[in-house]
Amino acid sequence: MACPYCKGELTFLDEGVFECNKCSIKFSSSFGVPVFINQISRASIEVDDRSDFWNQGWEKRSSRLLAMDSHSLLKERDAYLNYLKKEEYPSVTIFSEDKLRGKSFLNIGCGGGYEGLLFSGFGANYVGIDFSFNAAHFTTRLIERAGHRGTTYQAEAEYLPFKNDSFDFVYSSGVLHHTPNTQETLMEVYRVLRPGGEAIIGLYATFSIMFLWYRLHAILRGNVTRKAIGSWMNSNTEGDWKVGSSENKWTKTYSKTEFIRLMEAAKFSQIEVEQTQQQIKNIPLIGRLTKWALPSSFGDLKIGPFGSMLVIKCIKHAE
């Protein structure tokens, strides 16, 4: 482990407390989850404001999984894997026990626990981090209940609490476009990845049916400036997550060219980018019409690549 801010070595004291040997910042734990976000050294109001949205959202979404027994969780894990294969998710090639068993695996944005169940179930040495404490805590509980092994931390993607060259795989899907500085997060991914290691990163696609619709919808509501459109997208992209006054603060989208440039700037190589497909039933307005007028099988058809996610596979060159 390393201090997320100065990268100094961490010493475990007692009762879940870590102290940096270089800058002397201390990090505590809560319910067995180490918390590597130091609010004294950062803008605590901003941290609290951002984390509230995701904490409340994951509490809302994870309650169903937390009520399951181990047998039901394993069935849910297998159903999630089948879903990914059915959707022809571009990174599905890494979802195998042969490739992941015994490998060190970092999941940035472990969310509601599905990915933790999947990758720890494949025998990877799983480590998950999330900006939301609830997400990290829920993922730990789900992994333990399923009988798997894994560790989770509350941490920020821009400030990973790990030493250089720590992981064989780094995986993050649908997360880093919600961070204040996506470029910094990718540089951190490169730093903690071992030479020859593989990263798989998914970011929202600008030229997708979903996000072109969001922009059009924003303009039709009178948000005509770039700032106004961006603000409207922030508050509505994960609109069904809203609890009270909390809302999503960051949502960015990228073209394939922009995404590749980000990865090149972070020094990655052998960069391959694909865009997901779009199911007809999930297209705004058209999806609703098909549910009313056509068989469900029609809505399951996919067109593309016009889906909402760009996925990159790349490696860190052996030095």
Image (cartoon, grey):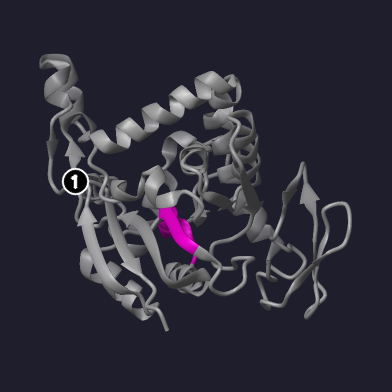
The answer to whether 118 is drawn above or below residue 183 in the figure is above
**In the displayed structure, does residue 138 sit left or right of residue 271?**
right
Quadrant of res 210: top left
Q: Residue at x 57, y 75 (%)?
A: 164
Residue visible at 65% across and 52% down in the picture: 153
Q: Provide residue 4's location: percent of width, then percent of height.
A: 65, 69
Name the kind of residue labelled 1 in the image. Answer: Ile
Residue 178 placement, left or right of 264? right
Residue 126 vertical placement versus 282 (above, below): below
- Give the residue at mark 1: 209
On the rendered image, what quadrant is the N terminus found in?
A: bottom right
Q: Determine whether, in the image, residue 313 is placed left or right of residue 14.
A: left
**Range of residues picked out in magenta:** 168-180
Looking at the image, the residue that sits furthest to the bottom is 319
Quarter of image, res 20: bottom right
Q: Which quarter shows the C terminus?
A: bottom left
Residue 14 lies, with reference to residue 21, above or below; the image says above
Nearer the observer, 150 or 183: 150
| Residue under the point 15% across and 23% down | 289
Whole-percent x, y for residue 73 in the image = 52, 25
